[in-house]
Image (cartoon, helix red, strand yellow):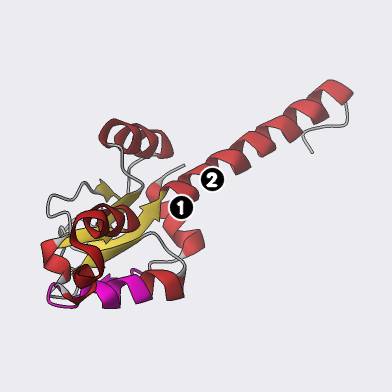
Amino acid sequence: MHVAQILAHKGNDVASVLPDDTVGTAVAMLGELRIGALMVSSLPGRIDGIVSERDVVRRLASDGPALLEQPVSEIMTPEVFTCAVGDTVQQLMERMTEHRIRHLPVCGDDGLLVGIISIGDVVKWRVNELEDEARHLQGYISGTGYA
């Protein structure tokens, strides 16, 4: 399974904010869209950073409610780990585990953003693969074919 197959199923939509948008705006978007991270982008397809629920919570503890008025660029993670359309699910799992991240922006050959993969997407696809394998094995063992 490759990133391209996951994106073909889930779509290429990427929610983003501008670097100058407030943290409050980002929090509202995260809640409204029921997602865990937003790309920070000053131009379409460009990755300036990523802001996640974790980024907000960490800074909220030290800055309090005033954090909501600060620009997203103040709390975003500017060094963003990415993946490519041809990467495998195994490579995604390794990268996410190694860097302790839950979201990987997907870049095309030109380096521009073409999608985003979350740990939930990866887990969903892996579970589907395991269920398919189990069905095939059950069919083989029972002699009813490869169901």
Q: Which residues are magenta?
A: 13-28
**From the image, which quarter does the C terminus lie in?**
top right
Q: Residue at x 43, y 46 (%)?
A: 119
Residue 101 position, x and y percent, is 31, 43
> Which dot, 2 or 1, sits closer to the camera?
2
| Numbered tag placed on residue 125 in the rendering | 2
Query: Which numbered marker is on residue 70?
Result: none
Q: x and y percent of residue 79 in the render?
A: 13, 49
Mark 2 vs 1: CB contact within 8 A:
yes
Total residue callouts: 2
Mark 1: which amino acid? Gln
Task: Decide: few, some or many residues near mark 1? Use Cα within 10 Å; few <14, some 14-19, many ≥20.
Answer: some
Q: Position of residue 41 (x, y in %)?
A: 17, 70
Whether 73 is among the magenta residues is no
Report helix, strand or loop for mark 1: helix
x%, y% of residue 11? Answer: 44, 66
Residue 5's tag is 1
Quarter assignment of residue 42: bottom left
